[in-house]
Image (cartoon, rainbow, N blue to C red):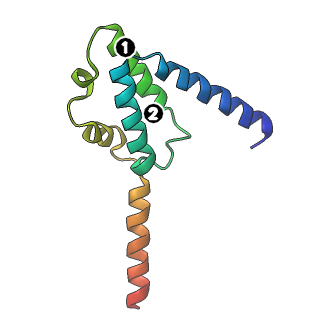
Amino acid sequence: MGIQDIIEGKKQWRAHVARVKALPPDYQIVYKEMQRYLFKVGPVDLTEGNLLSEIVDFFEQGAASGKGVLELIGDDVAAFCDGLIEGSPTYADLYQESLREQSGTAEK
């Protein structure tokens, strides 16, 4: 990754953050909770994909139609996030696999 790639990535991230800040306050709160959750347990390729941008797109559409954020995603933010990443390898999966490998090595 070259310097130009890093600079472009920062520009894209700043534009993304600006879009989040333009959302209504309740959407911003829920987005930040979703982001925190996804960075903690989310898919391994989260930073390489478009998931966060797609969430902002979805929220922008919901806000434009006058819906509250919980009308869009429901009361359980974590369950909504889990549905988004279902089938994608997560850091939690990698951790579980490493534990299985360690316990398998310890038994031998």
SS type, badge 1: helix
SS type, badge 2: helix
Q: Mark 2: few, some, or many residues within 10 Å (few <14, many ≥20)? A: some
| Residue 79 x %, y % | 25, 41
Q: Which residue type carries mark 2? A: Leu
Please state, as top left, top right, bottom left or bottom right, where the C terminus lies in the image: bottom left
Distance from disc 1 to disc 2, alpha carbons, whole Å, reads: 15 Å
Task: Mark 1 and mark 2 in contact? Answer it, CB < 8 Å.
Answer: no
Q: Relative to residue 26, is residue 14 drawn left or right?
A: right
Q: Mark 1: few, some, or many residues within 10 Å (few <14, many ≥20)? A: few
Please state, as top left, top right, bottom left or bottom right, where the N terminus lies in the image: top right
| Residue at the spot 42% in from the left edge and 76% down from the top edge | 101
| Residue 8 x %, y % | 70, 29
Q: Which residue is mark 1?
A: 61
Q: Which residue is mark 2?
A: 51
Closer to the N terminus: mark 1 or mark 2? 2
Who is closer to the viewer here, 28 or 7? Answer: 28
Which quadrant holds residue 47? Answer: top right
Q: Is residue 63 above or below residue 20?
A: above
* Residue farthest to the bottom, as pictured: 108
| Residue 72 x %, y % | 26, 22
Who is closer to the viewer here, 33 or 85? Answer: 33
Q: Which residue type carries mark 1? A: Gln
| Residue at the spot 30% in from the left edge and 43% down from the top edge | 82
| Residue 103 x %, y % | 38, 81
Who is closer to the viewer here, 34 or 81? Answer: 34
